[in-house]
């Protein structure tokens, strides 16, 4: 399947998209925001790989983690631009991953604002188990999606 992807040629720096995300989250009512970093060879230093925050839902303060899977974007982009240098692939993948996260978050928060969906519908898969360093989605996936299957014979 091939679709015309939005933002794959973006020149918006990742740190600007991350800043926009933080601004959206603050306006939305995030109680705190934390960023996680990891190396991304061939680039020097580390890059922001996820943004975690606490948001109140139905009277509960819940941790949420928004990841940017830059390595997956790099795999995809390398197929589109096989002659690109590793450095250019890494830089563009960072820009794409965070610009996409910003766009998606902005649209979803707009849907919440218009009462089309609830906060939990948007953030359920991103609810975060701090002790295990996994999102709800990652926990369900690592269990073979058994938590989603109906129980038989009960």
Image: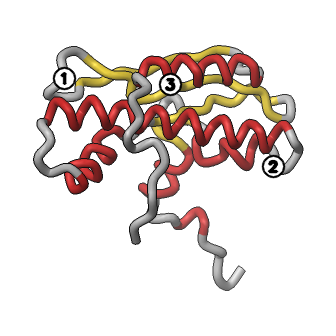
**Residue 31 point in image, percent of width and height:** 71, 16
Find disc 2 in the rendering and name its residue: 117
Structural crowding at the residue carrying mark 3, measured as other residues with C-alpha within 10 Å and reported as few (<14), some (14–19) or many (≥20): many
Residue 1 higher or lower than 96, as above or below = below
Residue 148 higher or lower than 59, as above or below = below
Number of the front mark, 3 or 2:
3
Q: Place residue 79 in its image quadrant.
A: bottom left
Which of 37 and 143 lies nearest the eye of the viewer? 37
Q: Residue farthest to the bottom?
A: 153
Q: Residue at x 50, y 22 (%)?
A: 18
Which of 42 and 78 lies nearest the eye of the viewer? 78
Find disc 3 in the rendering and name its residue: 17
- Say whether disc 1 or disc 3 marks the residue closer to the N-terminus: 3
Number of the front mark, 2 or 1:
1
Q: Place residue 118 in its image quadrant.
A: top right
Find disc 1 in the rendering and name its residue: 43
Quadrant that contains the N terminus: bottom left
In the image, is 140 to the left or to the right of 57? left
**Residue 55 point in image, percent of width and height:** 72, 26
Determine the CA span between mark 3 and mark 2: 24 Å
Q: Residue at x 14, y 36 (%)?
A: 86
Q: Residue at x 32, y 37 (%)?
A: 93
Structural crowding at the residue carrying mark 2, measured as other residues with C-alpha within 10 Å and reported as few (<14), some (14–19) or many (≥20): some
Return the mark for residue 80. Answer: none
The answer to whether mark 2 and mark 1 are in CB contact below 8 A is: no
């Amino acid at each position: 399947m091939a679709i015309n992807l939005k933002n794959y040629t973006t020149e918006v720096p990742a740190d600007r998209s991350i800043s926009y995300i933080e601004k959206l989250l603050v306006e939305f009512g995030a109680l705190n925001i934390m960023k996680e970093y990891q190396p991304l060879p061939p680039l020097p230093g580390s890059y922001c790989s996820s943004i975690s925050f606490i948001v109140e839902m139905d009277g509960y303060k819940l941790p949420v983690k928004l990841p940017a899977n830059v390595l997956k974007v790099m795999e995809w982009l390398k197929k589109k631009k096989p002659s690109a240098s590793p450095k250019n692939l890494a830089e563009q993948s960072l820009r794409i991953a965070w610009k996409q996260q910003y766009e998606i978050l902005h649209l979803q928060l707009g849907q919440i604002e218009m009462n089309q969906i609830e906060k939990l519908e948007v953030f359920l898969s991103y609810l975060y188990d701090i002790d295990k360093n996994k999102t709800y989605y990652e926990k369900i996936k690592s269990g073979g999606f058994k938590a989603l299957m109906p129980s038989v014979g009960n």
